[in-house]
Amino acid sequence: MNNFNPADKIQDLQYFGEFGGVNPSISDSSTYTFLSAKTMFDTFEGNAEGCYLYSRHSSPMNLYLGKALAAMEGTETANVSASGMGAITPVLMQLCNAGDEIVSSRTIYGGTYAFMKNMLPNWGIKTHFVDITKLDVVEAAINKNTKVLYCETVSNPLLEVADIESLAKIAKKHNLKLVVDNTFSPLSVAPGKLGADVIIHSLTKFINGSSDTVGGVVCGTQSFIDDLKNVNNGAMMLFGATMDSFRSASILKNLRTLHIRMKQHSYNAMYLATKFENDGLKVVYPGLKSHQSHKLYNNMINQEYGFGGMMTIDVGTLDKANELMELMQNRNLGYLAVSLGFYKTLFSAPGTSTSSEIPLDEQKEMGLSDGLIRMSIGLDNDIERTYQMMKSCMTELGIL
Ligand SMILES: *Cc1c(COP(=O)(O)O)cnc(C)c1O
């Protein structure tokens, strides 16, 4: 991974517009004409490289964005989708049939958890939720029906780190596909380089970075992406969560500044995490030595991009958490909002929002406490000023 710099890979790509524009032209069409009927047939069969048929299948801009994201993850290719869930659900449906099983981290995005727990059983697919940091527990949950090992590089919302290299070895040994959601750690971690088979992102978060759209991507081998796009039995093709070309154009432009943004998110988060921990607050941030997987994560990341923009603090009770978030919002320090990767700090109490799909007793068991606040640290120019202002909010409320 040392020689692999994903931001350089993105920078090296060149796409010109129709008239030599520095950005590729947006193809504003759902369907494409053919000069010969034979070429139309060949295209439908997937045998006419460079020919477009219908934009749910493929469109020039979606291919450009997919190529850039594949370059970033170092995979053969990628396919974009209308949302992160529009990437996750078809991947699982493509890899599993009735009777198959999934072993998944129990601390994952609430929507993914709800899909595995409440919907996949309707198609006869069962999921075992495990503590992904315990490799023996992961391996013990695998049986002859298991097809997929699923995790997030850095988990939502508890910021647990998955040891992707070791999980990839377990997956290989049992002939499973290791599927990794890398939404929290773009550029910092390249799961494909550590042995993951399929890498998924919600583009909605850091990658797009402007909280103006939802989007997703699946990065993997050419043959897997071809399977997903197959007109007869491809789950991405047939579920139809296709991204619009205007959106992919705008995400591609934002992707070009991702490296600069990630450095600033990481710098600011590290700054606040260190200060607040010194002040005696309970802080979880993978960049802190106190984080249970700090050493592991330190070895996994591309140091240039740091430990990421996500941290959690625990202020004891939900009431305190709510008071603090409202006060910080009133002082314009950020917004009480779900999602992440915005220029402004976003905060929410995961137990009552993004992880509310997870039953209360299970939340407790996984260590998701009432007073937990998840923060996506913004691109603040003067983070010391932000720190001082946040600290005075905490002091006023008796938290510090
Ligand atoms: C937001 C998110 C998703 C879902 O993505 P959408 O774009 O909202 O569909 C999946 N995984 C993680 C880790 C997320 O943060």
Image (tube, helix red, strand yellow):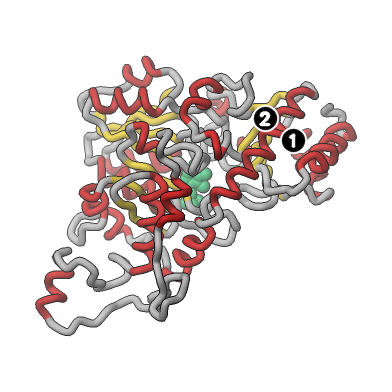
| Residue 59: percent from left, percent from top | 33, 68
Q: Is residue 331 left or right of residue 258?
A: right
Residue at 36%, 23% (x, y): give it. 166
**Image coords of residue 256 (percent x, y):** 51, 57
- The type of residue carrying mark 2 is Asp
Residue matched to label 1: 321
Q: Judge: label 1 CB < 8 Å from ligand 1.
A: no
Specify which label sits upstream in the sequence, 2 or 1: 1
**x and y percentages locating residue 237 in the rendered image:** 28, 60
Q: Residue at x 42, y 69 (%)?
A: 245
Would you place residue 250 above or below residue 134 in this image?
below
Which residue, given by chain and number where applicable, does mark 2 sit on?
Answer: 370
Element type at mark 1: helix
Which residue is outermost to the bottom? 35
- Residue 23 lies left or right of residue 265; in this view the side is left
**The one of 28 and 2 positioned closer to us in this rendering:** 2
For the point 23% across and 72% down, the residue is: 51
Q: Amino acid at mark 1?
A: Ala
SS for callout 2: loop
> Mark 1 and mark 2 in contact (Cβ < 8 Å)?
yes
- Residue pictured at 58% horizontal, 23% vertical: 367
